[in-house]
Image: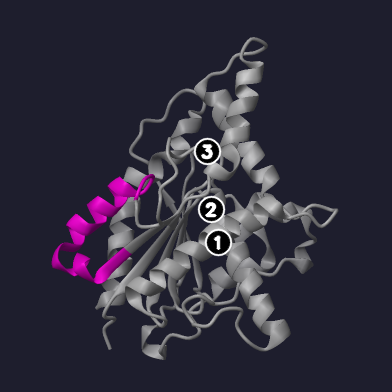
Amino acid sequence: MPADKIGVIVIHGVGHQHDARPATSSELTFSKDMARRVRRKLGERATNMAWREVYWSHILHGRQKAYFEDIRDKTSVDAPRAFVMSALSDAAAYRKTADGSAAIYEQIHARVEMAVRDMETDIGPNGQILILAHSLGAHVVSNYIYDLQKFAMRSGQGRFGSPLQNMRTVAGLMTFGCNIPVFLFAHQLADIEPIAYPGSALPEDDQIMTWWQNFYDKQDILAFPMGPAAPCYAQMVADRQLRDVPIHLGAPVMEGWDPLSHGSYWDDAELITPVVHYINKILA
């Protein structure tokens, strides 16, 4: 049976995204152009799509900006240095520390929770979701789903009151510029456990076999294929749950590496086309 509506939840990765924090998850910033292009390609079907953003860069940007002001007279402060600093500090801050502190981890997850809760008002408690996650955002979404799945296993019930909020109606996950493999080296290979299929509450006819597609440009040194990262992910590839998709971003390859190219996925046809295809597949 065709889906009546689909909710698209988009989360950004490392780096400062926008000068002003959006007031709501429906106020689009970093994904505004992508949403516009997707809607144009969908045509009339775009009326059946809700789009929400998970915006979290404001949690760390103020402190990062203050540090750069303090070192301005001590070193160069250019775009590549600012990006690398932001990327490293974003990744370092988003973790559970040895002393049990997880303040940044929890604040970022609270932003995911807010967007998911908002999406329920758009498509209902059983509505299907497509998640688009860039860069570190893929790691955030994976952890968020993983934590909910572990909570359900321990308690025998979901943390929230609906399948959608418990991330059990996720029809598909599309990651791009994903750097999850970087974080796996902290664990023994045998201990690495991926998220289980997050669409278990969907009717069987609505469940898509290859529910996780991971897009990466070979020239993007912050983007990695998932299959070789651990035996469990290799098994997901073998089972056709996960597919690594190499793409070539439209930006020209420069001598050396342009760190700003890591954000080029948002406007590239090689990503937008499969996003539209996935949405059409779910709606049809």
Label 3, residues with CA under 10 Å away: few <14, some 14-19, many ≥20: many
Please name the residue shown 53% across and 19% down the image: 78
User: Magenta span: helix, strand or loop, mainly?
Assistant: helix
Q: Amino acid at mark 2?
A: Gly
Identify the mark at residue 141; answer none if there is no mark.
1
The residue carrying mark 3 is 15
Residue at the far right: name it. 99
The tag earlier along the polypeptide, 3 or 1, is 3
Please name the residue shown 60% across and 83% down the image: 158
Identify the mark at residue 137; answer none if there is no mark.
2
**Considering only vertical position in the picture, is 206 above or below 71?**
below
Quarter of the image with the N terminus is bottom left
Real-space CA distance between mark 1 and mark 2, rounded to the nearest whole angstrom: 6 Å
Real-space CA distance between mark 2 and mark 3, rounded to the nearest whole angstrom: 11 Å
Give SS at disc 1: helix
Q: Amino acid at mark 1?
A: Val
Magenta stretch? 28-50
**251 relative to 240 in the view: left or right:** left
Please name the residue shown 53% across and 65% down the image: 113
